[in-house]
Amino acid sequence: MTNFGFEKHEMAVFRKLSTPQKIQRFLDDQVAYNKEKDGETCRSPRRVLRDRLAHCAEGAYFAAAALRLLGHPPLIVDLMAVRDDDHLLAVFKQDGCWGAIAKSNYSGLRFREPVYRTVRELAMSYFAHYYNLKGELSLREFSRPVNLSRFDRTGWMTTEEDLFAIGDYFYTVPHRAVMTPAMTRHRRMLDRRLFEAGLVGSVQ
């Protein structure tokens, strides 16, 4: 296993994350949700491992690094929303189908088993779980998978610097709409029970 600059004690942790499911479980159980405001931090995978703290982007980059150590390309898909935060997924393929790993304060925006034939199918699986605090279903667009190896020159997996440049890059990547213009004219609201279910275990 190539270590990509990680130290021996760090690799000992990654070796235990031998499947996408185990990577997600580590993010859920061993890494606290980072409630800092956008722009305050964007930790590298090394810092997430050390601090055991991550928000959506930090968790996605960590998962992409862990997937890379398993032999997958470090791919990220950006989900864009209205009146809500964007969400990043570390995506992977098994047996020709897409799955995803994610860190979120909402229970429905995390792991997806690799059963989706296309990236669009995968992105749409998040639609009914993606909502803002007013209960509005807010997902509108998704990007193609971006390979983080393009940022290897920055040492993104192990740097002590924040990874803001990676997040900025997603603003330049083309996104595809999940709905037609006619569909977007209707404000779609989530059922109250699903709203509350999505907040189970969230950090307030």
Image: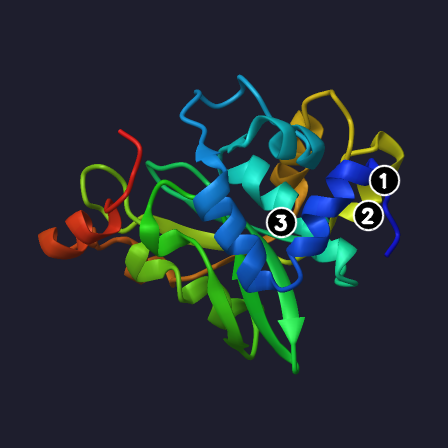
Asked if the residue at tag 3 contacts the one at tag 1, i.e. Cβ–Cβ closer than 8 Å, the answer is no
Q: Position of residue 185 (x, y in %)?
A: 26, 53
Indicate which disc residue 131 carries: none
- Position of 6 with respect to 46 (left or right) is right
Which percent across, then down, holds residue 104?
A: 42, 43
Give the residue at x 64% y 43%: 62
Q: Residue at x 16, y 48 (%)?
A: 196
Instruction: Measuring from the top left, give residue 13's x and y in whole percent.
Output: 68, 45
**What residue sits right under mark 3 in the picture?**
63
> 17 left or right of 204?
right
The reply to whether dot 2 and dot 1 touch (C-beta < 8 Å) is yes
Residue at x 63% of width, y 64% of height: 19
Q: Is residue 181 above or below residue 6?
A: below
Q: Is residue 166 left or right of residue 29?
A: right
The amino acid on which the numbered mark 3 sits, given as a three-letter code, is: Ala
Residue 149, label in figure: 2
Q: To which residue does mark 1 refer?
A: 152
Q: Sort mark 1 into few (<14), some (14-19) or many (20+) by Cα contacts within 10 Å.
A: few
Q: Quadrant of residue 190?
A: bottom left
